[in-house]
Image (cartoon, helix red, strand yellow):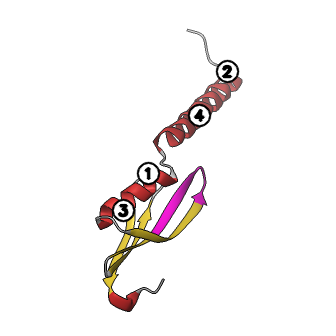
Amino acid sequence: MKKIGKKAIIGICAGAALLVAVVAVIAIMVFRIDAVRAQNIALSQTGGGEIVEQDISQEGLWNEYSYTIVNGDKWYEVEIGGFGGVEGFESGTGNGYMY
């Protein structure tokens, strides 16, 4: 049986690390959501309404979305992660939120 040299082991490890990085970037690009999808998710959480404020912040390779929505006399603040998960949700009625 042939011994594997130190340089070969380092090369294999570097290649494996590069492969993992490439797969991770591709997965992020495929599974991340855009602003339209984030708005739809936020509005579905509130039962509709009007978006009166929005903030999009970039976190690495994806964005995080924050919306303030008014529906009737209720207001909602909804945070959507870059992959579509609801990461924050607040609601209230009346003058608790001024827009």
Q: Secondary structure at mark 1?
A: helix
Label 1 belongs to which residue? 37
Q: Position of residue 67 (x, y in %)?
A: 46, 68
Q: Secondary structure at mark 3?
A: helix
Q: Sequence-wise, which precedes: disc 3 or disc 1?
A: 1
Viewport quadrant of the N terminus: top right
Residue at 50% x, 62% y: name it.
65
Image height check: is 67 above or below 96?
above
Q: Which amino acid, by three-letter code, is at mark 4?
A: Val
Judging depth in this view, the residue of 14 and 83 nearest the camera is: 83
Judging depth in this view, the residue of 63 and 40 nearest the camera is: 40
CA–CA distance between discs 4 and 1?
25 Å
Magenta stretch: helix, strand or loop mostly: strand
Are the residues tagged 3 and 1 within 8 Å (C-beta)? Answer: no
Can you tell which of label 1 and label 2 is closer to the viewer?
1
Label 3 belongs to which residue? 43
Q: Which amino acid, by three-letter code, is at mark 2?
A: Gly
Stretch in magenta: 58-67
Label 4 belongs to which residue? 22
Could you say which quadrant of the image residue 79 lies in? bottom left
Q: Secondary structure at mark 4?
A: helix
